[in-house]
Amino acid sequence: MITEPNEGAMKFFVDTADLSEIKDLSETGLIDGVTTNPSLIMKADRPMKDIIAEICEIVDGPVSAEVTAIETDEMIREGKLLAGIAENVCIKLPLTLAGLKACKELTDEGFQTNVTLCFSAVQALLAAKAGATYISPFIGRLDDINIDGMGLIADIRRIYDNYGFETEILAASIRTSNHVREAALLGADVATVPPATLKGLVKHPLTDKGLDAFLADWKKTGQTIG
């Protein structure tokens, strides 16, 4: 059974297949899951099943592993193979009609599903009706074509709340700290963030300036704590 930490709070997934980054970030206690896709697996340059298995050993929460088939029956077959790697694998499916059919069957059989490549509120509505555990709207890619990605998050949140859908909004294609802030303000359930962006969330120039001043003053005292 997949562990769902921090229920009721915004969750952070890290969007990578880089094992060293996942290990490093998991030690902070901030990571609730991992998302991968074929492009990230390609960068890792190792067999997909091996990578997913190792990630699942590091992280207790959901680890999204994506099918590569485009036909429903083959998506279901691949999804079950991926789910067999570890108990916390979440099957990632494309937002196509075939993908929604696969989502419905896999969900009915008790598997967790993440429907990806969502770019409209009506797509998200269909995914929720198909029983998706997560819907992944791509914020940054919409911004790239001058469409308000955060507006999509707001629309999905309102639709899901209108009808009581339990599908979680997994804000994806996040590129900036502002994306994270706005996703949280709008009520996204999860933000999946590249490692560099996630690490950057902790940074602020006034934090650095204040720490430098404290350390300088402490040095002048000539004291040590222990």
Image: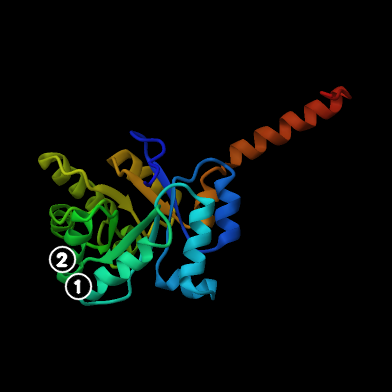
The crowding category of the residue bearing disc 1, from other C-alpha atoms within 10 Å (few below 14, some 14 to 19, many at least 20), is some
Kind of residue at badge 1 = Thr
Residue 6 placement (x, y as % from top left): 40, 35
Q: Is residue 191 left or right of residue 93?
A: right
* Residue 203 sits in quarter: top right
* Residue 78 sits in quarter: bottom left
Q: Is residue 67 left or right of residue 49?
A: left
Above/below status of 6 relative to 174: above
**In front of the other: 190 or 48:** 48
Residue 84 placement (x, y as % from top left): 38, 62
Q: Is residue 138 left or right of residue 41?
A: left
Residue 219 placement (x, y as % from top left): 84, 29
* Residue at image mark 2: 101
- Check contact, mark 1 vs mark 2: CB within 8 A: yes
Above/below status of 58 relative to 95: above
Q: Which mark is residue 54?
A: none
* Residue 213 sits in quarter: top right
Q: Which mark is residue 72?
A: 1
Q: Which residue is painted at 50% across and 74% down in the image?
A: 47
Q: How is the image coloured?
A: rainbow
Q: Which residue is painted at 44% across and 45% down in the image?
A: 32
Kind of residue at badge 2 = Lys
